[in-house]
Image (cartoon, helix red, strand yellow):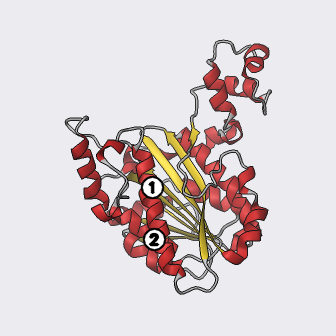
Amino acid sequence: MSKSYIKINYNLRPAKSVERKMLCEALRRLIFFSDLTKYKYVGFGSTFFTDFLLIHKSLGINDLTSIEKEEEDKDRFEFNRPYDKINLEIGDANSILPGIGWNKKIILWLDYDEKLKKNMLTDIGTFISRALAGSIILVTINVGPDQLPDKNNKKERYEQLVDRVGKAKIPIEISKHDLDKQNHPKVCHAIANNEIEQILSIRNQGLKSKLIYNQLFNFSYEDSTPMLSFGGILYAESDAENLKKCNFDDLDFTKCEKSKYDPFKIIVPNLTFKEMHSIDKFMPSENISEIRNKGKLKFLDKEEIKNYGSIYRYVPNFVEAEIH
């Protein structure tokens, strides 16, 4: 069994850190649906519980549940649990999620480190079929292409996908030619969105006020391997005005077009703190040439400055770097 938390220090992944801060900024806007302190947060804390620390401190959410599948490491999870209020559930998400209590609005982060599989679609379906209006789901998956002896064997690559998710879950328009490094993330996104639409259609059959799923997030980043994070909000037709008040569209990093694959790419350039602070002085600005010249940063590539400028508000600062 692969235990990524043993191999990877989750606190040292810069793109992931940026993603967490962006999510928190967006989630603060849920106040138009409900007081944030009334939400429940459910995620996979692992041994670092980094997202739990941020969610609790930034949003004030006290109802926290961490799902951990490695029962043999329960003592380690308990030892590293930063708050007693975090409810630790040991077991597979497929078995734990249905019983977590769906009587309040939920923010669910299914933060997988593996490629898309059938059990993940089941977890997504559990949320869509049970969550209250105003709830949020975010799904993170590994979208690197399958490693095969013959990387050009498109048929075998397609068969690997079928083995993971099942033939019935793959949209009919997807072929073996769509599973290269460039298109594989788009395929995974399409499969997950199909599952959301199908489960939601079934749920809405018995409802007078229909529920709607609206995509909010679609991040791509690569700290060590290509990852995709996508998700959105489940809301009732009667909540349309509340959704409008949230102004999610105003955020540079949100992707609110329904089911469209157009990821916001989080690229954290390898800059020193001094270089970043020199760029900060000119932010917000899209004038890369001015920043290079006036900031005495001509030794930096224009693309580095552009990438940093798109995320500068969310990059950990000196204090956070020392703490985490």
Q: Amino acid at mark 2?
A: Gln
- Compute the Cα span from label 1 to label 2: 12 Å
Question: Farthest residue toward the front?
Answer: 173
Q: Quadrant of residue 263?
A: top right
**Foreground of the two, 241 or 305:** 241
* Residue that badge 1 annotates: 190
Where residue 62 sits in the image (x, y, percent)? 64, 70
**Foreground of the two, 249 or 8:** 249
- Figure check: 323 above or below 118: above
Residue 140 visible, this angle: yes
Q: Secondary structure at mark 1?
A: helix
Drawn side of residue 10 relative to residue 323, left or right: left
Where residue 60 sits in the image (x, y, percent)? 70, 65
Q: Amino acid at mark 1?
A: Ala
Where residue 43 sits in the image (x, y, percent)? 51, 63
Q: Quadrant of residue 76?
A: bottom left
Q: Quadrant of residue 178?
A: top left
Residue under the point 63% across and 17% down: 300
Residue under the point 58% across and 85% down: 207
Q: Which mark is residue 198?
A: 2
Residue under the point 37% across and 55% down: 116
